[in-house]
Image (tube, rainbow, N blue to C red):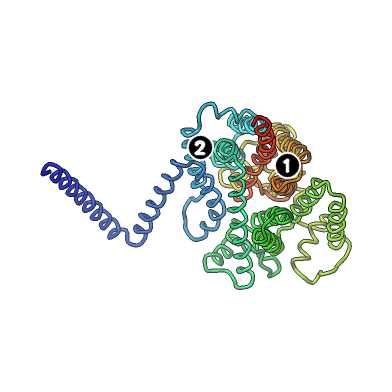
Amino acid sequence: MSELASIFTRKNTMTFVVMLVASLALSYVIAQGGFVALVGIIALMIGLFLLYRVAVHPAYGIVLTLHIAFSINGLGRYVDFPFGLLTDFMLLSTLIFALFHVKRKELFILNNGLMAFVGIWFLYTVMQLFNPEPHSFEAWFYAVRAASLYLIISVVLVFLIFNTEKDLDLFFRIWLTGSLLGALYGIKQLYIGLNAAEQYWMATKGAHTHMIFGQLRVFSFYSDAGQYGAIMAYTAVVGTILSVKVSTLGRKLFYAITAVLCFYGMIISGTRGALFIPLIGFITYFILSKNTRVLITGFIILGSAFALLKFTYIGEGNYDIRRMRSAVNPSEDISFQVRLKNQEKLGAYLSDKPFGGGIGTIGYWGQKFSPGTVLAETPPDSWYVLLWGETGVVGLIIYFSMLLYILARGFWKIFKMEDSFLKQKLMAIFSGVTGIIVASYGNPILGQMPCSIHFYLCIVFLYLGPEWVERGKQDALTS
């Protein structure tokens, strides 16, 4: 008994000594660094706890990545910190932990057409390191993340550890809740005003693009109004379609309210290209529904809205309506004409460069690492034009082949499915994805968070969703 007591005594003594040393160390750090050090210590402790959760349950890493994608751009206005590296760290650490959890025989799920296209595109962007055109390795390192690295890691992770209908439902909850908050905060910016950090950002960077004729282009807590408008439109399409067949009243109201507020968020963003997301998205949904009444009614509503903007001047006194009207009248839009001239300029420059100028040579990274060059000084104003400049016509062929495969397979599989709420979910995703693909011609949507990470998860769920039904039928036959 005395031996046992002595053991506990030694343990208590050691615990006390460790706690005392840790307390003294923390006190010294806080005394030297003040409030900043305290915040840093708290952030480190939270970070270590979250990393532990990801190590135990790697799927939690995808959830954290989605939350980071919503908040990362807004945080940059308040704290000078490379938040973009958080996405890199979270995705890479989640991938490492996932590989420890997944059994070797479960890797067969990666043997599919989507993974093949994604892999080919990723390898092509890696081979851009050997592009004969002069370019910066550092620029390639930064730019390849948006071009292909986030895509391939996200697709692999969803296939391996986030691949059930419950995961899809969780994805919807995070997505719609985050977008609803974004819509509400955008409305707050419009009617209450900007805070000090947002005003500083406007004064130093955003005024020339986000204050048009004295009218604020709302950006909420996203990187800019373009990304805000795109994710609002994306969510409006998905929320509307989900609200149609959901069984419970509470969820129906949530989806519907989110869709309405996000559609309004799209309008007040002043992002003209985002208008094509609901336009193309709902047309896609009407066709997939295979319901003649829905198809005819939907086309009448969309056609009337289009005609109202295209052929009348109704509501011309309203800034938001004028802004949307310019989207369907590109011949009268000066900025659109400038874009066409820039594309002609790029076409002439790239005529003898089938592999492009190299990853990171155009847009933001081009201006940072190779200023003064033709590519760096020519605004791409489009995701596809950016990829054209970086990877050439060969890169565009590979990339568009991947997108066409996603659309063709997704459409055919969903079209053959029997009516169910799962089909409704997949139709919502597919309609939004189609709209995003079309709208990316007008803005670099697929190269920015949060639209990009949502798109990557969606294309895997489009691949897996129909297989859930087929697997369920096989299980029913064998049971």
Left or right: 98 as drawn, with respect to 114: left
Q: Quadrant of the N terminus?
A: top left
Which of pointers 1 and 2 lies earlier in the amino acid sequence? 2
Taking depth in this image into account, of 452 and 373 the one nearest to the observer is: 452
Taking depth in this image into account, of 117 and 356 the one nearest to the observer is: 117
Residue 120 x/y as whole percent: 64, 30
Taking depth in this image into account, of 441 and 258 the one nearest to the observer is: 258
Q: Secondary structure at mark 1?
A: helix
Q: Secondary structure at mark 2?
A: helix
Disc 1 from disc 2: Cα separation = 37 Å
The residue carrying pointer 2 sits among few (fewer than 14), some (14 to 19) or many (20 or more) residues within 10 Å by Cα, namely: many
User: Which residue is painted at 42% across and 50% down in the image?
Assistant: 47
Residue 329 x/y as whole percent: 83, 57
Residue 415 x/y as whole percent: 78, 41
- The kind of residue tagged 1 is Leu
Query: In the image, is residue 421 above or below residue 403?
Result: below
Query: Which mark, residue 95?
Result: 2
| Residue located beneath label 1 in the image | 346
Taking depth in this image into account, of 479 and 442 the one nearest to the observer is: 479
The residue carrying pointer 1 sits among few (fewer than 14), some (14 to 19) or many (20 or more) residues within 10 Å by Cα, namely: some
Residue 106 x/y as whole percent: 55, 29
Left or right: 177 as drawn, with respect to 83: right
Asked if one can make out residue 353 in the rendered structure from this viewpoint, the answer is no
